[in-house]
Amino acid sequence: MLRTLETFTRTESPSTEKIAADQCARVIAGEWKKRGVVVELLLQKHRGAHIRVTTSSGKANAGGQLLVLGHYDTVYASGTLSTMPFRTSAGRIYGPGVFDMKAGIVQALFALDAIQHFHDSLSKRIVFLWTSDEEIGSQSSRKILESEARRSDAVFVLEPSLGPKGLLKTARKGVGEAEITVRGRASHAGLAPEKGVNAIHELALQIARVTEWNDPSNGISINAGLVEGGTRPNVIPDSAKVVLDLRALRIADMQKIERRLRSLGPILHGAKLKVRGGFSRAPLERKCSSELFQRASQLATQMGFAIGEAVAGGGSDGNLTAALGIPTLDGLGAVGDGAHSPGEYVFACTMPQRAALLATLLISG
């Protein structure tokens, strides 16, 4: 498993670098082809190829499909290996993308090995889908993964687990961005301030208004993360904008926030507002994952270890499949920490255990 992870990690795969991502896709696909399964490279015009791996059920009367979902793209530019090399130390594996989430792909590969070794047939077909653009919004992969999810009875997402205890992610916040643009009227700040409409002042009032919607106890957060406006201090600014990060734990709250954004009106006389955007990924609510988690927990207990659950503030492609009403269990990938940071790592000893859990989940259908 370590040798395979090293190969995948040394083949760098930034989301925005198509040539590098395509090369990584070919390397990963080559490992899966050794298992005698159907491997397809789904080539993209602007992004790396997506990888679809399909097993047959082995039974003439079998029906249904299980989807194992993940991504091989990383947030690290090509050349990061020179300052963040693949290495092992004190039972930890370091390198760009090992935790998020190439170790998860390796675990799935060895879960397939276990299934093929111990079982002649499966009750359902298994599709493994590894995409190239999850870290930048899944624009080229969304239709593909949603299509596979609609054909599936359950989705197992190999995103990394949460925390050193390897908690599964049974709920995820919905994620989105909204932009509020204000149009005012320019004027001289000293000679004729009364003739102007200050777009920045209006924007400040709007930011104060929307941040009152924050409700941490119910999983709602709105963050003004980017603000632009004005030209120079002695000019009443005629334009300003803010980009908001939106998070909600419940679909009803997501819908409420979007309604409130669309109903915003100007506060200062003469100002005009334009609101764009909203949630791009609906929340993964626990009701969509609870039965799968209970099964995973029971299987883990039978295998001699305990597994817990948690709520994650970030989104994944699991949000997209859950929004379709497909039972989805997330966080089945690597156990470690430091995603998207120079210290990203995986606990090596947990990889076989997680591969065994995934194999057992897939065998049980």
Image (spheres, helix red, strand yellow):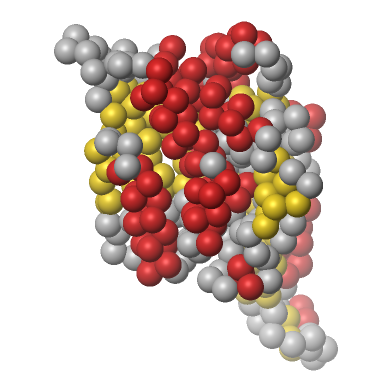
Residue 146: name its quadrant. top left
Residue at 68% across, 44% down: 346
Q: Give left or right: position of 112 versus 291.
A: left
Relative vertical location of residue 172 with respect to residue 65 in this rendering, above or below: below
How many circles with numbers are drawn on the protein? 0
Residue at 42% across, 67% down: 20
- Extreme left residue here? 60
- Give residue 133's position: percent from left, percent from top: 45, 54
- Give residue 119's position: percent from left, percent from top: 36, 16
Q: Give left or right: position of 235 versus 61.
A: right
Identify the image quadrant of the N terminus: top right
* Residue 253 at least partly seen: no
Q: Give left or right: position of 91 versus 353.
A: right
Identify the image quadrant of the C terminus: top left
Relative vertical location of residue 207 with respect to residue 105 in this rendering, above or below: below
* Residue 120 at least partly seen: yes
Relative vertical location of residue 100 with respect to residue 282 in this rendering, above or below: below
Q: Nearer the viewer, residue 244 or 326?
A: 326
Q: Nearer the viewer, residue 6 or 148?
A: 6
Residue at 47% across, 51% down: 72
- Give residue 203's position: percent from left, percent from top: 71, 63
- Give residue 168's position: percent from left, percent from top: 64, 27
Q: Nearer the viewer, residue 85 or 128?
A: 85
Residue at 73% across, 81% down: 236
- Extreme right residue here? 190
Q: Nearer the viewer, residue 233 or 79?
A: 79
